Image (cartoon, helix red, strand yellow):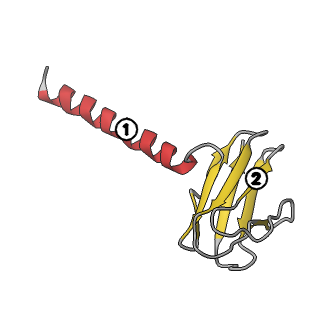
Amino acid sequence: MPALKLASRLAGAALFTFIAIGVAQAQGPAGAVTIDNFSFGPSPITVQAGATVTWTNDDDIPHTVRAVDGSFHSKAMDSGDAYSFTFAKPGVYNYFCSLHPKMVGQVIVK
């Protein structure tokens, strides 16, 4: 196989791998968000309409999950607690921790 053709195939495979890894990381495990070290991850998370997202507090202090538009709001979650919300409609949902407002996240519903 000529060197140029081989290089082209390798470059294409590398680009595909890069794109596939990027998509997997952006979407994360479907419907699961971890709260740890004063952050939400993954964020953004992408799910399909009708999916339930569950936030689990793995931090050592309480946190909440509150939608900017008020569509969902958890109670204060201690370590190990979880909160779930089902996203019925497509859209972009921005949220934050009402105890630590600099903690922000986003759910993209397709």
Q: Which residue extends farthest top?
A: 1
For residue 84, the mark is 2
Occupied quadrant, residue 97:
bottom right
Q: Is residue 38 above or below residue 7?
A: below
Q: Give the x, y percent position of residue 49.
A: 77, 40
Q: Going 58% across and 70% down the picture, which residue do you hit?
A: 59
Q: Give the x, y percent position of residue 82.
A: 70, 58
Q: Secondary structure at mark 1?
A: helix
- Position of the N terminus, as image quadrant, is top left
Q: Which residue is mark 1?
A: 17
- Tell me whether circle 2 and circle 1 mark residues in contact (CB < 8 Å): no
Count of labels in the image: 2
Q: Going 19% across and 27% down the picture, which residue do you hit?
A: 6
Q: Secondary structure at mark 2?
A: strand
- Quick one: 2 or 81, which is closer to the camera? 81
Q: Count neighbours of disc 2 (C-alpha within 10 A) and say few if under 14, some if 14 to 19, many if 20 or more.
A: some
**Front disc: 2 or 1:** 2
Give, as a three-letter code, the residue at label 1.
Thr
- Position of the C terminus, as image quadrant, is top right
